[in-house]
Image (tube, grey):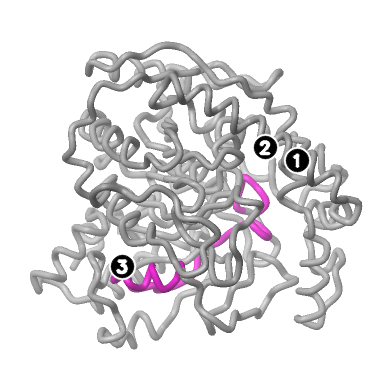
Amino acid sequence: MKLSEYAGFDGLGLAELVQRGEVSPIELAMCANQAIEKVNPHINAVVERYPDKIESLDTHSLKPGPFHGVPFLIKDIGNLEAGRLCEQGSRLLAGFTPEEDSYLYKLISNSGVNNIGRSNVPEFCIASTTENALYGDTSTPWRKGYSAGGSSGGAAAAVASGMVPIAHGSDIGGSIRIPAAHCGVVGLKPSRGRVSYGPQADERGFGMAANMVQTRSIRDMASMLDCLGKPQPGDPFVIKQPQRPYREEMASPVGKLNIAFSTEPLMKGVSVDSEIKEAVEATAILLESMGHNVERAAPNYNPQDALVHCPNLWFMGFDRYMDAMAEMMGRKVGSDTLEPCTLELYKKAKSLDPFTLFEGFDYANKVRRDFGEHFSKYDVWLTPTTAKVTEPMGKYGQSLTGYSTEEYFQLSEGVVQFCVPYNITGLPAISLPLFETRDGLPIGVQLGARHGEEEVLIRLSAVLEEALPWKGRVPDIHASHY
């Protein structure tokens, strides 16, 4: 199979070829490996490849799932697979390998994919860009030297550039959706509790984090949600289960929806790019032409407060975690092992107390109640994914010096302002690559829905994918060009 052919398929398309005997999993693994060899030197999305899953692949090790034999990448976070490096983009954890598989990794394996390597992340997945001192920086394939977003930037860049059709991502403050917007792929943050974090943890970031994937198509996203969205033993709670497979929801009638949309910035002093506004407005007009009720409206939400409370929730205990990791690895926490902004977070975490935590819980409760009111009137909230398109690297990375924790997070407020509310509330949200700027950079449009109603997003996204197809848009740095 030629690279131009391989890179033109989504995951299910490749799986169909395997099922029909037209190509083998080993051939696909070799194609993915070749794509990485050609493309990765330009964008640095992949930090490790697994020879035993490529040229030495035992096809009997692959499960007979819907993505049987499809090349896949794991994000370098979360201690997912026993015996494989999981360094979380940090010199502090260089060489670390977990001792047990997570439930998530078992579910990923059961989907049938062939996990061929690891994708790049910022240190401990903290930044909205993928830049680190351990492996270097990841570019969007649309413009070398411009950010792929973070923290799942390696995953999104690998999918967008044709290395693999699907890659694992995680999201605690937009970390799936921001890279999806900057790289022109599909990124879904599922509802809180949809995808298990066990057995190593019950939840991450007090429920603000979620695992899922980056894909090129809605059908891949829907099918992977079917594979990963399964309750596991000991999960802290089980949310509403789908009435039918999400893959089947793509063909289900959307119905007439009440849709709110916003184009104005949620934060004072932070503008939204004019072309991003135009993209959201064009989507609103299209949805109205399809028969939906569409109007301008936004929930009561103060992002300035999020800048105070969310980091406190995210990093409560971060200092103890760093100390434990340092002891385990035989290293010391300091400027030789942590990047400057991460080191500031480590120091900040030492000052956090239970009262700070309770204040954060109170804030999160208020946001959930306000969003509950909003979604009692509307089925969907349409917004930009990010207020800015991709920017040159070096603006948001953790190597910056001279910033307090508060000042550092203020830097990226324009990027994350539309994403973080869904992490606070636990509601599902998806970024779609519906448009691009006049000079060819991708624009992400975000749809959010009620808790447990991913099917609404899948149905509506499928309709938008058909009306505004993005399959034919290929970045300059892409496997098909080799």
The residue at 50%/78% (across/down) is: 101
Bounds of the magenta segment: 104-130
Q: Which residue is mark 3?
A: 111
Q: Which residue is mark 1?
A: 360
Q: Are marks 1 and 2 in contact (CB under 8 Å)?
A: yes
Give, as a three-letter code, the residue at label 2.
Answer: Ala
Crowding around mark 2 (Cα neighbors within 10 Å: few <14, some 14 to 19, many 20+) is many
Give, as a three-letter code, the residue at label 3.
Answer: Ser
Q: Which residue is mark 2?
A: 364
Residue situated in front as seen by the camera: 444 or 68: 68
Mark 1 vs mark 3: which is more N-terminal? 3
Give the left or right position of residue 40, taking residue 362 as reference.
left
The C terminus, quarter of image: bottom left
Q: Indicate the position of residue 415 as horizontal and vertical percent values.
A: 60, 34
Give, as a three-letter code, the residue at label 1.
Answer: Gly
Of helix, strand and loop, which one carries label 1? helix
The residue at 52%/55% (across/down) is: 170
Mark 1 to mark 2 CA distance (whole Å):
6 Å
Say if residue 225 shows up in the picture: yes
Is 120 inside the magenta-drawn segment? yes
Camera-near label (3 vs 2) is 2
Q: Indicate the position of residue 181 as horizontal and vertical percent values.
A: 46, 39
Of helix, strand and loop, which one carries label 2? helix
Give the left or right position of residue 11, taking residue 440 as reference.
left
Mark 3 to mark 2 CA distance (whole Å):
34 Å
Give the left or right position of residue 109, taking residue 307 as reference.
left
Q: Residue furthest top?
A: 295
Q: Are marks 1 and 3 in contact (CB under 8 Å)?
A: no
Crowding around mark 1 (Cα neighbors within 10 Å: few <14, some 14 to 19, many 20+) is many
Residue situated in front as seen by the camera: 56 or 110: 110
Camera-near label (1 vs 3) is 1
